[in-house]
Amino acid sequence: MLNNIQLLRAFAAINVVFFHIIGISVQYGMPATNFLFMKDWGQNGVDIFFVISGFIMVYIQSKKRKAPLDFFRNRVERIVPIYWILTALLCVLYFILPSAFANTELNLNKMFFSVLFLENLVNNKLPVLYVGWTLEYEMLFYFIFALCLFIRKQVVSYMMMVVILGSVDICCLKK
């Protein structure tokens, strides 16, 4: 069963890649007209990917039972270093090749909130590494999930209901 769900997650990720390919091709004057029907798939792919990732996270945690701090530390160690390296690289490139980033706003505030995974959530702007907006939601989920691991099961079920409803509300307000 888990393999089939992982395949669906891979399909969602591939759709997101096509979404970006279509966007880039249009940006450079080479519209991928044969693939425009996939644009909506890519937009929905992020949502599907998040839902499946959340399910898998709960499933794996129910089997392996990691301590909350171990769980969160593991996620931070997997995501933060590469994200910070890529963000720093983009900041350096911004100052070396400013013409390549003509439509990009970069300041200390943006860099600060970007490395904390809060730029989109706090300022409603894309982080320095623009695809990092998805990581902001992932890190928020990991943080809330780790907090829930500290709490007794009965309380967690009520909290998860509130988190799910709150997440739906936030997503609806964002769009």
Image (cartoon, helix red, strand yellow):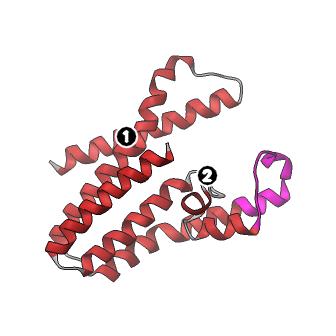
Rendered image quadrant of residue 75 = bottom left
User: Between residues 60 and 44, which one lies in front from this camera angle?
Assistant: 44
The residue sitting at 40% across, 37% down in the picture is 44
Q: Is residue 64 left or right of residue 45?
A: left
Residue 103 within the segment the image draws in magenta: yes
Look at the picture and state if 55 lies above or below 78.
above
Which label lies toward us, 2 or 1? 2
Which residue position holds label 1? 12
- Residue most toward the top? 34
* Secondary structure of the residue carrying numbered label 1: helix
The residue sitting at 49% across, 29% down in the picture is 39
Look at the picture and state if 160 lies above or below 165.
below
Q: Of the residues shown, which amino acid type is indicated by label 2?
A: Tyr
Residue 41 within the segment the image draws in magenta: no
Picture coordinates of residue 8 (x, y %)?
Answer: 29, 41
Picture coordinates of residue 58 (x, y %)?
Answer: 23, 63
Chain-order first, disc 2 or disc 1 = 1
Q: Which residues are magenta?
A: 90-107
The residue sitting at 15% across, 68% down in the picture is 63
The reply to whether dot 2 and dot 1 touch (C-beta < 8 Å) is no
Picture coordinates of residue 162 (x, y %)?
Answer: 28, 62
Which residue position holds label 2? 130
Q: Residues within 10 Å of mark 1 (few under 14, many from 20)?
A: many
User: Between residues 83 and 52, which one lies in front from this camera angle?
Assistant: 52
The residue sitting at 27% across, 48% down in the picture is 6
Q: Of the residues shown, which amino acid type is indicated by label 1?
A: Ala
User: Between residues 134 and 34, which one lies in front from this camera angle?
Assistant: 134
- Tag of residue 45: none
- The majority secondary structure of the magenta stretch comes to helix
